Image (cartoon, grey):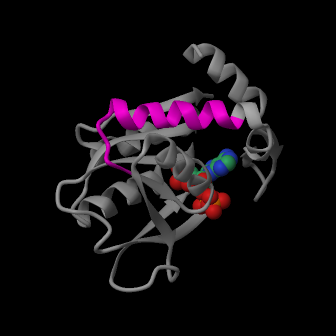
Amino acid sequence: MPDAALAELLLSRIRDVPDYPQPGVVFKDIAPLLADAAAFAALVEALAARVAALGAVKVVGLEARGFVLAAPAAHAAGVGFVPIRKAGKLPGPVHSRAYDLEYGSAVVEVQQDAFTPGERVLVVDDVLATGGTVSAALDLLRQAGAEPAGVVVLMELAFLAGRSRLAEHLGDAPLEALIEV
Ligand SMILES: O=P(O)(O)OC[C@H]1O[C@H](OP(=O)(O)OP(=O)(O)O)[C@H](O)[C@@H]1O
Ligand SMILES: Nc1ncnc2[nH]cnc12
């Protein structure tokens, strides 16, 4: 499916929820997209294609909505999946990083043995807002020895300028958004 047609299909299945989870935030609800088999399949196919194109050998998903996209994309691309989770959810030695996002702050973690040294990994998430979450993820996966092959998000909220905040964390890795608003 051409990029523009895919973007139109995906955008048509994302619902704006004003003042959620706090006043002033317009929440991008992907539940209708996930519930639509054809739209979800097209999304997973597009993400899986980026795995091969960017030479990634694993897909990293960001809890929780990132998991819903990253795990099927990894499976479709025939590569492994690694979770980055909110603090306290992963057993064994972990690397941790605190960060701020559009409507709060959190700590994320990855298991220290998640990657072999230099392994190229693709980071997948649903929404890029301020960029805090993906910045923390990139720092974490480098700390764990992986090499970011790229970041792909379903939707970039360009007015929040996450892309510029991310630049120093990305290095040479590309940031791609299937939809930009
Ligand atoms: O660019 P940022 O400002 O960092 O915001 C983007 C992040 O915010 C949401 O995650 P959230 O922490 O709400 O978690 P969820 O997926 O568990 O709902 C979203 O899924 C992204 O990961
Ligand atoms: N406006 C928003 N909608 C959905 N997820 C988000 N994560 C951060 N900001 C968001």
- Left-right relation of 139 to 42: left
- Left-right relation of 141 to 108: left
Q: In the rendered image, is residue 102 in sight? A: no
Residue 19 part of the magenta segment: no
Q: Is residue 70 above or below residue 140?
A: above
Residue 141, position in %: x, y? 31, 60
Q: Nearer the viewer, residue 97 or 56?
A: 56
Q: Tell me what residue is drawn at x 18 percent, y 54 percent.
A: 118
Residue 54 part of the magenta segment: yes
Residue 108, position in %: x, y? 46, 70
Q: Nearer the viewer, residue 134 or 104?
A: 134
Q: Tell me what residue is drawn at x 82 percent, y 45 percent.
A: 18
Q: Nearer the viewer, residue 167 or 46?
A: 46
**Ligand 1, what quadrant?**
bottom right
The segment highlighted magenta reads 40-58
Q: Tell me what residue is drawn at x 50 percent, y 83 percent.
A: 88
Residue extending farthest to the front is 78
Tally of marks? 0
Image quadrant containing the N terminus:
top right
- Left-right relation of 49 to 9: left
Image quadrant containing the C terminus:
top right
- Left-right relation of 64 to 90: right
Residue 17, position in %: x, y? 82, 45
